[in-house]
Image (cartoon, rainbow, N blue to C red):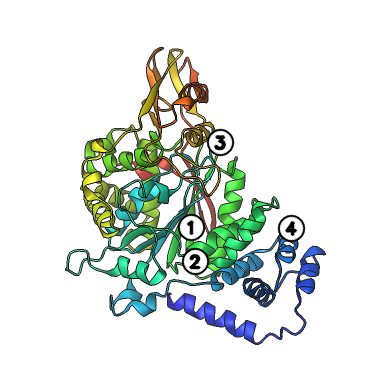
Amino acid sequence: MSDKQNLRKSQRKSQWSATKHDHLTPQFILAKKRYNLEPHTPAEIAWFIDQFTQGHVKDYQMTAWLMAICLNGMNGVETAALCDAMVDSGEVMDWSSCTSICKDVNNLHKVDKHSTGGVGDKVSLILAPLVSSFDLVVPMMAGRGLGHTGGTIDKLESIPGYRTQYSSAEFAKLLLSSTDGSDRRLNAAIVSPSKDMVPADKRMYALRDVTSTVSCLPLQISSIMSKKIAERPDSLVLDVKFGLGSFNKNVEESLQLASGMIETGELCGINTTALVTRMDSPLGYAVGNWLEVKECIEIMSSREAALSGVSADLVNVTLALAGQMLVQGGKASSLRDGVAKAKENLLNGEAWNKFREMVSAQGGDVDTIDFPDQYARARFSAKVKASQTGYMVSIDALEVGLVGVNIGAGRKTVDDSVDKAAGIVFHKRPGMSVVEGDVLATVYTEREDQLANAVQRILDSCTFSSDQIELPPLITNVVTREGVEDFDYQSIFEE
C-alpha cells in the first residue's frame, strides 16, 4: 500500500472510531436511505457492512437497503465509502510485508487493468506480460465467464496445469520472486481473487442477482472497484465497453460508469483513468477459451501476426491500454509515447518472453503454448459460408457470445463447466471484402447436435454492404479525473 493510501486509510479509521455508533441500527440505516433524508456518512456505511459481514444485519435487511440505493442513488463519497467498507470486510494485499522477498517492494509501481467485459476480450493475456516487461508489477485478478461474456481465468485454465488459485501472500510472493535465480522478478501473474478477499461483495452480489439490482450504478461501481482496490495497486486503468456485446449498450452509459469508477478510485487513493471502447463485434478473430489463447500466442510470438491486421482491433486496444498504464507507472511521457514503447516490446518478443515466464511460474505446460497447433481440437466442426458478395459491416457480438454458450465455450450458470476447445474462429472480419461462398467462420464443439443451429446463427449475426464503409472508431474516449476527451487515434498511433 502506498503512503498516500495509508494516510487516507488512517484518516478514515480515525474518523470512524471517533464517531459514536450508539444510535446506529439496521432500521436507522434503512430509513435514512429509504426516505432519502441525507447522504450516509462513511461511518454509517462502514458500520452497516461490518455488521452484515458478522451476520448481525440479515439478508432481508441488506436486500431492502440495496433496493433503496437502487431507487435513491448514492453520491460519490457514499459510493467510495461503500467500496472501502467492502474491501475492509476481508483480506487485502499487504505489499509492505513482502520486504523479505523484495526489499524495494514499496518503491515498485503496481498497476492493474479492469475490463467491464465483452465477447472475445482476451486483452489481459497480452497486456499483463507486455506491461510487466517494463519493470512494472501487474497484480491481475480476473474472473470466469458467465452468460455471453468470456472469462480470463477460463481461458488461461485451458493451458494444462495452469494454476489460478493463490492466497494473497502466495500471490505477492509469485509476483516478486525471481523466475531464474537472478534479480529479475516475474512482475506479472493472472489469478482468481482469493476467497478471503471482499467477502461482503460476494454475499451482496448474490442478493443483487436475485432482486434486479445488479445494474444499479453505485452498486456496480463499488462491486467492481472493491476487488481491484483490494489488490492495493498504485494505479488502475479501466477498459469500459459499450455496444451490442457489452452490458452498457451506448457510450453515454459507459462514460457515466467510467466517471463513477474513476471518482471512487481517486477517493480511495488510487490514480485511476479509463478508455471507453466499442464492443459491437467480437474483439479479435477467435471466441472460445483455448482458441483465444492461441490467437494471443500468435500475436506475441510472431511479428508478422501482430502486424497482419487480422487481429488489428485486439492489438490496438491492448496497445492503448498498455500505453496508459506505462504513463501512470512513470515509464512513458504521454499516451502516444506509451503506445510506441508498448508496440516495440510487443514486436521484439519481450511480451512473449514474459508470457512464457508467467505460464511456467503458474504451473502451466510451456510446450503447449510453444506448439499451439498440437492442441487437441474439438471433435466436431462446421464452416459458415457467405450467402452474398460485398463487404462485412459487423458481427453481432452478443449473438456470437450466446452461440458460444450453446456450443460449450461459455456457461449459463456459475456451476456449469466449459469446453476448453469449443468456440468460433472468424476468417472474415468487419471491413473485409466477401465473395459468396467464402468461409466466414468455423465453429468447433463437442456438441454435434448444436452445429447446424450455431452455423445459421453465426451467419445471421453478420451484416453486409454492397459498398465498402468506414468502420466506427474502436476507442472513443479517454476519461480522467479532469474530464472526458475524444481519443485521437491518428495522433496516438501514427508512426
Is label 3 in a helix, a strand or a loop?
loop
3D distance between C-alphas at marks 1 and 2: 14 Å
Task: Measuring from the top left, give residue 164's x and y in whole percent.
Answer: 38, 57
Residue 67 numbered tag: 4
Is label 1 in a helix, a strand or a loop?
strand
Upstream in sequence: badge 4 or badge 2: 4
3D distance between C-alphas at marks 3 and 4: 27 Å
In terms of depth relative to the viewer, which is nearer, 251 or 93?
A: 93
3D distance between C-alphas at marks 3 and 2: 29 Å
Upstream in sequence: badge 3 or badge 2: 2
Give the labeled residue for mark 3: 244
3D distance between C-alphas at marks 1 and 4: 29 Å
How crowded is the residue under tag 4: few (<14 C-alpha within 10 Å), some, or many (20+)?
some
Q: Residue at x 39, y 61 (%)?
A: 165
Q: Which amino acid, mark 3?
A: Leu
Q: Which amino acid, mark 4?
A: Met
3D distance between C-alphas at marks 4 and 2: 24 Å
Give the labeled residue for mark 2: 229
| Quadrant assignment, res 2 | bottom left
Which marked residue is nearer to the observer: mark 1 or mark 3? 3
Task: Measuring from the top left, give residue 475's x and y in whole percent.
Answer: 46, 42
Q: Which amino acid, mark 1?
A: Thr
Upstream in sequence: badge 1 or badge 2: 2
How crowded is the residue under tag 2: few (<14 C-alpha within 10 Å), some, or many (20+)?
many
Evaluate if marks 3 and 4 touch, with contact meaning CB atoms under 8 Å apart: no
Residue 273 numbered tag: 1
Q: Quadrant of the C terminus?
A: top left
